[in-house]
């Protein structure tokens, strides 16, 4: 069973387009995250949701808008795509954001976005 | 988050122990040391974490120095499938308002050779 899944795995699009990446976790976790990994392999957190509520919103252009319809899903919508948005985007989830002594994150396989 | 520094790359012979160091000299008292790895084209995978004491699980051992300014991840019997980028990150206590804001650094590329 896939714990954290993302679709699509690859996404190639033109500058200026709007696209969405979907993420689902079947682990029953309360918290989900979006990370961006650039060409230098630097993995940086973008957003985090806990029980459908936004709790982390790092310095990300407002062209990026996360949406969590329920706690098992966290989608990422990107408006007016730019060349610099090309990267691999990883979704992750963890059981609990504040209560447990561990906050082990489980990552999805990633979505490779290429903006032409 | 406290910053971490790791060697860019390391090699290890198959079957031998791989010792991956990490410096986190600015770590504060309630921050945990976490290790993840990322095998090529996959998402990061949790390995182990610790606060003060040494830890061991089925994947690895984590040795944290007494002053907590550095740690070492040990893969006791490295296999070819352990070839990956290994990230050492320092994360605030889950009870801290910065909890979850972990950014992965450059990591160490470990290459296990036959």
Image (cartoon, coloured by chain):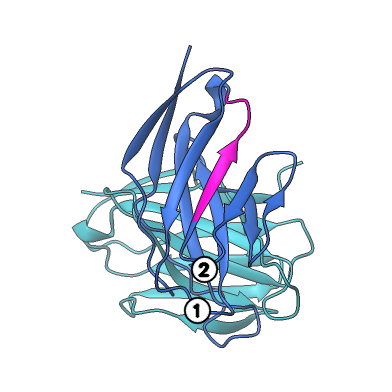
Chain colours: A cyan, B blue
**Farthest residue toward the top?**
B114
Please tell me how many numbered marks the rendered image carries.
2
Which residue is tagged 2?
A: B67
The chain containing the residue under callout 2 comes to B
Residue at the image point whose x is 27% and y is 68% from the top: A80
Tag 1 secondary structure: loop
Per the rendering, the mark at residue B28 is 1
Taking the magenta stretch, the answer to whether it contains residue B72 is yes
Give the left or right position of residue A54, taking residue A24 as reference: left
Q: Is residue A107 visible?
A: no
Q: Point out residue B101 in the picture as x, y percentages from the top left corner.
A: 49, 74
Residue at the image point whose x is 53% and y is 20% from the top: B80
Q: Point out residue B46 in the picture as x, y percentages from the top left corner.
A: 62, 50
Discs 1 and 2 share one subunit: yes
Give whichever of discs 1 and 2 has the lower sequence position. Answer: 1
Give the left or right position of residue B93, taking residue B14 as reference: right
The magenta stretch is B71-78
Q: Is residue A80 visible?
A: yes
Q: Point out residue A85 in the picture as x, y percentages from the top left corner.
A: 28, 60
B86 relative to A22, above or below: above
The chain containing the residue under callout 1 comes to B
In this rendered view, identify the residue nearer to me: B70 or B84: B70
B111 relative to A90, above or below: above
The span from disc 1 to disc 2 (Cα, nearest Å) is 10 Å
In this rendered view, identify the residue nearer to me: A109 or B78: B78
Q: For residue A37, which quarter of the picture? A: bottom left
């Amino acid at each position: 069973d896939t714990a954290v899944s993302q679709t699509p795995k690859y996404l190639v699009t033109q500058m200026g387009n709007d696209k969405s990446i979907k993420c689902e976790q079947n682990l029953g976790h309360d918290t989900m995250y979006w990370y961006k990994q650039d060409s230098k392999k630097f993995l940086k957190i973008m957003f985090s949701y806990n029980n459908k509520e936004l709790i982390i919103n790092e310095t990300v252009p407002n062209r990026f808008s996360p949406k969590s319809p329920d706690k098992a899903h966290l989608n990422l919508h990107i408006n007016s795509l730019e060349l610099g948005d090309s990267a691999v985007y990883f979704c992750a989830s963890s059981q609990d954001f504040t209560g447990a002594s561990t906050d082990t994150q489980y990552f999805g396989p990633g979505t490779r976005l290429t903006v032409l | 988050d406290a910053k971490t520094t790791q060697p860019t790359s390391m090699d290890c012979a198959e079957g031998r122990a791989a010792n991956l160091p990490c410096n986190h000299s600015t770590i504060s008292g309630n921050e945990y040391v976490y290790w993840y790895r990322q095998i090529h084209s996959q998402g990061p995978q949790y390995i182990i974490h610790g606060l003060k004491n040494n830890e061991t699980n089925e994947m690895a051992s984590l040795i944290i120095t007494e002053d907590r300014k550095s740690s070492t991840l040990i893969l006791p019997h490295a296999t070819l499938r352990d070839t990956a980028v290994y990230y050492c990150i320092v994360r605030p206590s889950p009870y801290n308002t910065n909890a979850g804001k972990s950014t992965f650094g450059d990591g160490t590329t470990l290459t296990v050779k036959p």
